[in-house]
Amino acid sequence: MGIAGSLMVIAIAWWIAFFALLPFGIRSQLEEGRVVPGTDPSAPTAPKLRRKAIWAFVIALIVWAVLFGVIEYRLISIDDIPVPSGLRWS
């Protein structure tokens, strides 16, 4: 896996992890009892985006490391995937 491929894997994994982490630990203004005038009552009070971005980066690096190991060290090959005998491609 080259540098460009590695950066793309990290970027895609970061966005997926970031969006997956967004709803965790959120309390709405309505739940807190402090609704700011002019905002939606379901808006978060403290989204903690920096912490979630850092955790998303850690998760993205773990995903990249696993994929890097699989690709570079051939931990899994196409022959390791179970396929019914009538559908063999080689």
Image (tube, rainbow, N blue to C red):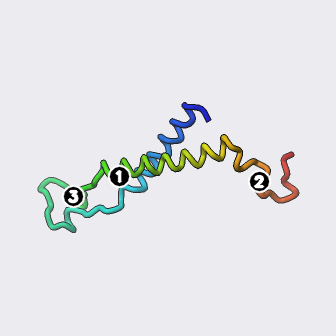
Residue drawn where x is 65% and y is 47% of the image: 70
Can you give x and y, in whole percent of width and height, for residue 63 in the image? 53, 49
- Element type at marker 2? helix
Query: Which amino acid does the dot numbered 2 rest on?
Result: Asp
Which numbered marker is on residue 45? 3
Query: Which amino acid does the dot numbered 1 rest on?
Result: Lys
Q: How many marks?
A: 3
84 on left or right of 3: right
Can you give x and y, in whole percent of width and height, for residue 55 in the image? 39, 52
The mark lying in front, picked from 1 and 3, is 1
Residue, disc 2 = 80
- Element type at marker 1? helix
Tell me, yes or no, whether the two marked residues, 2 and 3, touch with CB atoms within 8 Å. Answer: no
Q: Earlier in the sequence, mark 2 or mark 1?
A: 1
Image quarter (top left, top right, bottom left or bottom right) of the C terminus: top right
Q: Earlier in the sequence, mark 2 or mark 3?
A: 3
Q: CA distance from mark 2 to mark 1?
A: 36 Å
Residue drawn where x is 49% and y is 46% of the image: 61
* Vertical comparison of 77 with 35: above or below: above
Which numbered marker is on residue 52? 1
Residue drawn where x is 63% and y is 45% of the image: 69
Identify the image quadrant of residue 4.
Answer: top right
